Image (cartoon, rainbow, N blue to C red):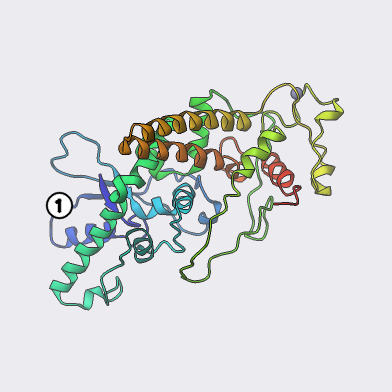
Amino acid sequence: MVLGYFTHLDKSDWEVLDQRCRFWGIESPVNIFIPPVQLEYEEDEEDNGSKGPRKFISLRMKGHHGQDILDVDVGMLHKKDIVRNFFAQNNIVYNSLELDTVARVRLLRGKFKGVTGANVASQKVELQKAYGKDDAELCYDLATENRDILIAILDELANIVHLSFQKVCNTGPARSWANYYRNVMNIEPAENRVIPKKKKSHADKTYRGGKILPYERLKSYENVTVYDFRQLYPNTAIQNNIAPDVICCSCCKDDPTAKIVTNDRNINAKGYWTCRRRRGSYPQAVLSLTELRAHYEELQAEAVKNNDKEKEIEYGLKQQACKLFANSGYGVYGNRHFEFADVRAAELINYCLWQDKSV
Ligand SMILES: [Zn+2]
């Protein structure tokens, strides 16, 4: 496993290393390539602007004994909602993805004092070396801190959705959910699903979510609790039976009790209904993930009884992974690149949720 911190951006460490190897005539371990067919960004649409062709990197290393080289970007892992939410649940909140910030919050120590990526090249060689080594250590410690907890959470996610660890590291919830529906639940995308429109700008959203305010500056707070509202989304989907395969089903078209009424006139005007006979895919998924979670919680409780600290931590982590994954299944409906995307599911869950005034 090769660890880096935001190594896949332009002018990344891998590219610099590659250039230096070429300059000194050393064989480069980095292979940078642009695939002949440029795929659209599968994950967040915010990113697919005028960035030019997307580059990919593969690593060559001697002495890997036939094992796959796993190129893990520790920075990208911390960017993942599922990882952010995992740490937030454990009262670890980072408000920027800078290595210094994440390291301070998770490891309680920051980057090398007085030296930055911008001024490192003008420092004495000894200092440059120390800076580079320290940076590498921070990155390694972020990956392995607390019994490899970061790696372990992604590994568990890979187990749940039946994807490889590397794939889960390099993709987001849209890929995980597509694989979960297709290969774990054996479900195909609903034929009558409504694919979200391409966003023209940030303001032109196909559907609106809760208002999320950005963090403005680094502060440390005391007596602050993280409230977990996200669980409300899966529960709303279960209560109202919302999923692409049951919205506007052919069997309940004339059943007046199948109608979904939200607090939004425009949504209600669309006259959506949901199936009264079958449970939808997302509610089914959430229920089986809840079952799996309960199973892990039982094993965790057993481990506590047997004073088995190791197993207690392992099952605690597994049950959190189930919950976090279940919570991430709502947001992907609005992502037009998600194979199972459906704007109706996204807006219905949203407006049924905000109907509850206590939220
Ligand atoms: Zn029906």
As helix, strand or loop, the secondary structure at mark 1 comes to: loop
Residue 69: image location, x then y, percent: 25, 41
**Cβ of disc 1 within 8 Å of ligand 1?**
no
Residue 242 shows in the view: no
Q: What residue type is labelled 1?
A: Glu
Quarter the N terminus occupies: top left
Residue identified by numbered label 1: 27
Residue 33: image location, x then y, percent: 32, 48
Looking at the image, residue 343 lies above or below residue 286: below
Query: Camera-side residue: 129 or 261?
Result: 261
Q: How crowded is mark 1: few (under 14 residues within 10 Å), some or many (20 or more)?
A: few
Residue at point 29%, 45% (across, down): 147
Residue 136: image location, x then y, percent: 24, 59
Query: Camera-side residue: 328 or 66?
Result: 328
Left/right of residue 178 with respect to residue 344 in the rendered view: left
Residue 5 shows in the view: yes
Please identify the quarter of the rendering in which residue 214 is found: bottom right
Residue at point 60%, 42% (across, down): 330
Residue at point 25%, 70% (across, down): 112
Left/right of residue 19 with respect to residue 292 in the rendered view: left
Please identify the quarter of the rendering in which residue 328 is found: top right
